[in-house]
Amino acid sequence: MKPYLLSLGAGLLVGVIYSLLGVRSPAPPAIALLGLMGMLLGEQAVPVAKRLMTKAPVVAYLKTSDCAGQVLGPQAVDPRKPEDQA
């Protein structure tokens, strides 16, 4: 039940922001896509900020974790490199 309430709260917040900006909902495609991109980047901002504060390696996290896949989608396989080699 908690994820549903969080989703509803986030939706209400976005609705208020849209209203303050004078954007109708559903937003025009460009605005909606930029909003989705902001959501994806914002979702990764907290783990990156935590790593920066603890002086943990950030670049390794960006390359090896779900961060890149979450933001950029599945990466294309290099046809020159066999799949069993990383």
Image (tube, helix red, strand yellow):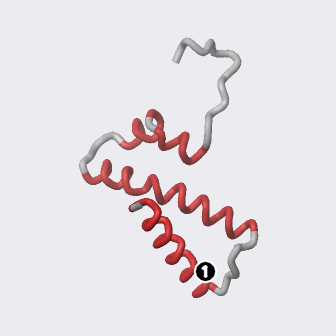
Say which residue appears at 54% left-offset and 61% top-offset: 39
Q: Amino acid at mark 1?
A: Tyr
Q: Nearer the viewer, residue 76 or 57?
A: 76
Residue furthest to the left in view is 54
Residue 44 horizontal side relative to residue 70, left or right: left
Q: Position of residue 56 (x, y in %)?
A: 29, 42
Can you give x and y, in whole percent of width and height, for residue 62 in the image?
A: 45, 41
Residue at the right extreme?
A: 29
Q: Is residue 54 above or below residue 8?
A: above
> How many neighbours does mark 1 have within 10 angstroms: few (below 14), some (14-19), or many (20 or more)?
some
Between residue 85 and residue 9, name the one nearer to us: 9
- Up the image or down, 38 lies above or below 50; here it is below
Front-most of residues 36 and 54: 36
Q: Quadrant of residue 80?
A: top right
Q: Secondary structure at mark 1?
A: helix
Residue 73 in picture, x, y percent from top left: 61, 41
| x 26%, y 46%: residue | 55
According to the image, label 1 marks what residue?
18
Q: Position of residue 68 (x, y in %)?
A: 53, 41
How many marks on residues? 1
Q: Quadrant of residue 65?
A: top left
At a point 50% along the width and 77% down the height, the residue shown is 13
- Residue at 75% x, 66% y: name it: 29
Front residue of 13 and 79: 13
